Amino acid sequence: MYKISSELSTSLNYTESSNNVLKILHNECQLKCGMLTILDDERDILLIKSIHNPSPNPVMDEKQVYYKVGEGIVGDVLKHGSTIVIRQLGNDARFADKLALYDYEKPYICVPLKDGANKVIGALSAQPPQCRDDSLAALSKFLEMIGNLIAKNVQLAHKVETKERQLVDERDGLRRKVRNNYSFKNLVGHTKTMRQIFEQIRLVSRWDSTVLLRGESGTGKELVANAIHYNSPRANNPFIKLNCAALPDNLLESELFGHEKGAFTGAVKQRKGRFEMAHNGTIFLDEIGETSAAFQAKLLRVLQEKEFERIGGTSTISVNVRIIAATNRNLEEEVSQGNFREDLYYRLNVMPMYLPPLRDRIEDLPELAEHITKKLSMAQQRQVSLSDNTLRLMMGYTWPGNVRELENTLERASVLCESGIIGPELISFSQLESQMPLQPAKVHAANNNHFSEPEPSMDEREMVIDALERSGWVKAKAARLLNMTPRQIAYRIQIMNIEMKQL
């Protein structure tokens, strides 16, 4: 029992461990030709998973043998769920000699394997030597105990296998979802500049060249980095991101390279760095222009040699990592001023990509706005859209915050929109034109977070209403009457709380 329980506890591969169990039963317990059969729920048959065959030349391949419910002694155990002990095997008409292994003159024992719900999941059988009835009863009890141990092992193996299959399916599903989120169809833009960038992304994704993403904040550098990784051969491997501006040098070094236990105060255990975690994948170093010269020197070696040591360690760790870096700084100026290492600049600037600001590709704004409103519709589980006047208003703005500001503006407007159609009155920009005399409404915490409108001049409010009435409540015409832009008239309508009439 000790040897058998030890054997079953060494592995979750019950087929392999049960082979060794059957050998122990054969060699030390005189239970010959042991056979383990497991129920196949889909076909409702017992399949042979393990058999100890002392004969060097088996009559037939046991992998092709199976037992139906009620077929033979094994099938009868599956059907009734109780142990069968036969004094002389040849005298029992139920015996189906499919393997031609057993001695008809000797006894035969077959015990069921049951799960926690008392359902039969298999059978364990063996042939003991000729013995008295009391010895035969003891051997059947012993074989039942062995069957219980094997049943627990089988159940545990099935649970682990099911869990692993679920995790693999979930992982593959998440990978497909991420790939879909960062596929080329989600890169929005039709201007010539953006088409060139999309073509560059398609080309550089194939290879492991270092990429340097340049552009203002909010232009989509991280989105492009994701697209490059998830459309590359490394897509199934890690994609590790790090904002270099978010940490001081000492913590940044630990984050990237890791540390050994006791390397500094608070290092209570060994920790892998981002480079080590990104092995065989991609690492994205955002805001690389914000790093200090001391840290740049340490980073240079990793980029050149693809090897490093953890803080406090002496062993060199080699990694296979693709580098994608991003910055909104003018690195050429930083190099000339001595703020950025020239050798690191050349190491990073293998494949530079310049992402234009939104104001330089304003023709893409309708397409971008439609893409963002679709995402908002899915998130809010309703239809969100823009009116034509809203789109014209947005086309006249310079968008200093680029696509990020556009996303924030539309999300803010969608939250305030009850009908689902975002009108110009719901669009508020982060910067107001200098010639606008009115100030935006302020938020007062004491007013339960409601917007309190400033008290506008009644003369000016009446003037706006008069212009709207004369223009048939068309904002563009009213703006021309007041010598204003459509955005200015829309802003006044919003803060003066003028209710637009539908004609």
Image: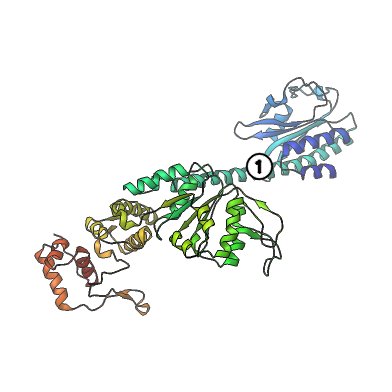
Tell me if residue 75 comes above or below residue 305 in the rendering. above
Q: Quadrant of residue 432?
A: bottom left
Task: Identify the image quadrant of residue 92.
Answer: top right
Query: In the shown orientation, is residue 395 left or right of residue 243?
Result: left
Tell me what residue is drawn at x 25 percent, y 65 percent.
425
Q: Is residue 108 visible?
A: yes
Residue lying farthest to the left in this orientation = 470
Query: Relative to 418, does residue 137 appear above or below in the rendering?
Result: above
Q: Residue at x 70, y 59 (%)?
A: 313
Residue 274, image x, y percentages: 59, 56
Picture quarter with the C terminus: bottom left
Work out whether residue 189 can be spotted: no
Q: Secondary structure at mark 1?
A: helix
Coloring applied to the structure? rainbow
Q: Nearer the viewer, residue 455 or 418?
A: 455
User: Which amino acid is tagged 1?
Assistant: His
Q: Which residue is mark 1?
A: 158
Residue count near mark 1 (Cα–Cα under 10 Å), binned few <14, some 14–19, many ≥20:
some
Q: Position of residue 231 (x, y in %)?
A: 48, 44
> Of 482 and 466, which appears nearest the observer?
482
